[in-house]
Image (cartoon, helix red, strand yellow):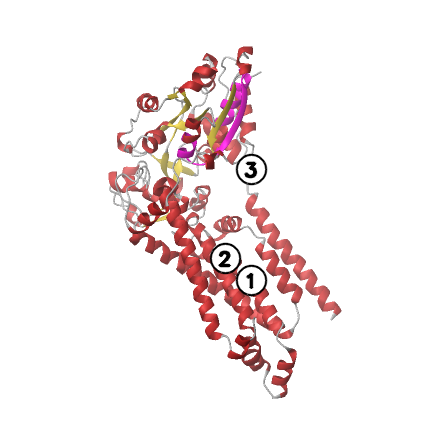
Amino acid sequence: MIALISSPRLASIQGAIEFIFTPQTSNVTGGKTVGGIHQVLELLVNQLELTIFALALSMIVALPIGLYLGHRGTGELFATVIGNAGRAIPELALIAFMAALIGVGVLNLTIALAVLGIPPLLTNSFVGIHQVDRSAVDAARGMGMTEFEILRKVEIPLAIPTLFAGIRSATIAIVATATIAPIAGVLTLGDFIINQNVYGDDGVLAGAIMVALLALTLEFGLAALQRRLTSKGLKLSPA
Amino acid sequence: MRSEFTRLRAGIALLLALALSLGVVACGSSSDDGTSSEEGESAGAIVSNPKNAKVSLTIGSKNFPEQEILGEIYAQALKAAGYKVKSDLNLGSETVALQAVKSGAISGYPEYASTALTSFFGIEPEEVPAGATAAYEKSKTEFEKEGLTAFPPTPFASANAVGTTKKFAEKEGLKTVSDLEGKSESMTLYGSPECRQRIDCLAGLEKYYGLKFKSFHPVDIGLRYTVLEKGQADLSILFTTDPQLAAEKDKFVILEDDKEVFPAGNVIFVSKKSTVEKAGPDYEKTIVEVQKGLTLEVMQELDARVELEKQTPKEAAAAYLKSAGYVG
């Protein structure tokens, strides 16, 4: 409480923007400057890479299971309970636990972050496929499609909005949490936030702004991709 | 259908249990080696003075174990001297703590002389005096300009240190940081994220020792021994007061900082001048008296109680006051 009220000097948006574009002096670096567009971009790329690795891993694990169970129409409880239990795992504890098993670094973080992506992907892929109109599936089967063709040509296109909602949730959860990666060996934008005494309050705010911008960019990018992939027929309905 | 459902439920229960135990294991890893040699330097017991009951004090500290223990020691000692004492041992960084002192939100808190000089007063680490007394005199003068009083320092000093496993040090023939010359290019160094750019850490090793490392990896402070134990790190940034150094002498060693790049920090207690005057002579007397027993070994031992044996800082502080004879 006290910390907030008597914070020495509030960071300013202006100071943070300056930090993002121009290297600043720091009290503790012995003359080396910190921040600036070069360092910001480097850390941003790291965070993006880590996000892509973790998202890919969580999709490889969750989507086949979710699609299969959704198609079969069984395992609803499995898909939702795993979904909810997964959200309850504390990320920091997971990183620390795996640090003792496999050490720190990209692999540890990829797995720990993928754990965040699996619940929404699993739940949404299951629900998306499961809710597809059964008469459409029956019609496809009547036309002689194989089960795989039904999934690929009928169910997945019809489930695109729900599937993408899952991918977007997973992406946001992963990219936001990748901010804590500097505690386990990978320098991401969180470096600016964790090390207030190196970067100053402006650096902390700059880090937060960049993380928010990155997350919003990914969110809008995926939303645009979703619109392109959604079939025309579905777009007419409000969903 | 029915049997499938039951099977599924059992499977889910199993998975849930697994997920939960993951969390529990991660939270509850504690070392089981009991280091409890009672370090007892006999000292004068603190006498309660009824005059002090009118004075309310709030003792602060930063939010990591060593600071919390120190905060508790001062708070409990002042309480024994008759003061009305509250504590706020959860101040984030030194800038926040300093501001809390200045604003009167806390009466005082313990700070490392080296941190005060570099972080508050912009003094280059290489200009921080190596001797405890000189560093104290210098920070006292600087604090006075801000209307603050710094009491004399503790016997122990805390500093960053390059650490490694004893095995690795013997294999590579490492005793001092200078011994790393010509060898460090093939070694990995792990340290806290802030270490990378701090002159009293990696930046100083590069600048003053001219060392280059194969790679530097930022990790949480809590993992500084894990990365050595896992064999992931060749070198790791440790602290001289680390309890592991005392508890596992045959496992971990620190390399001597022969060029004195890492400024040593003895702890000084910082208050506002007006607070000191209001609190009366027992304030300084109690604080200076109670820290006399805090040698490096005693501080490592107290840190061990909290970090390895999972005692609370409050318990560790009470044990110290009792075994050193400050309270009956």
Report the residue marked by disc 1.
A120
Quadrant containing the N terminus of chain B in the rendered view: bottom right
Q: Secondary structure at mark 1?
A: helix
What chain does mark 3 sit on? B
Q: Give whichever of B20, A36 is nearer the camera.
A: A36
Report the residue marked by disc 3.
B32
Magenta region: B70-98
Amino acid at dot 3: Asp
Residue density around tag 3, few if under 14, some if 14–19, many if 20 or more, within 10 Å: few
Contact between marks 2 and 3 (CB within 8 A): the answer is no
Q: Give whichever of B30, B77 is nearer the camera.
A: B77
Amino acid at dot 2: Ala
Question: Seen in the image, is B50 located left or right of residue B70?
Answer: right
Report the residue marked by disc 2.
A173
Q: Which mark is residue A40?
A: none
How many tags in the picture? 3
Contact between marks 2 and 1 (CB within 8 A): the answer is yes
Vertical position of residue A191 compared to residue B63: above or below: below
Q: Quadrant of residue B27?
A: top right
Question: Is any atom of residue A50 visible in this view?
Answer: yes
Residue B237 at what x, y percent from top left? 38, 40
What chain does mark 2 sit on? A
Question: Seen in the image, is B204 located left or right of residue B79?
Answer: left
Residue A194 at what x, y percent from top left? 41, 45
Residue B244 at what x, y percent from top left? 46, 36
Say if labels 3 and 1 share a chain. Answer: no
Residue density around tag 1, few if under 14, some if 14–19, many if 20 or more, within 10 Å: many
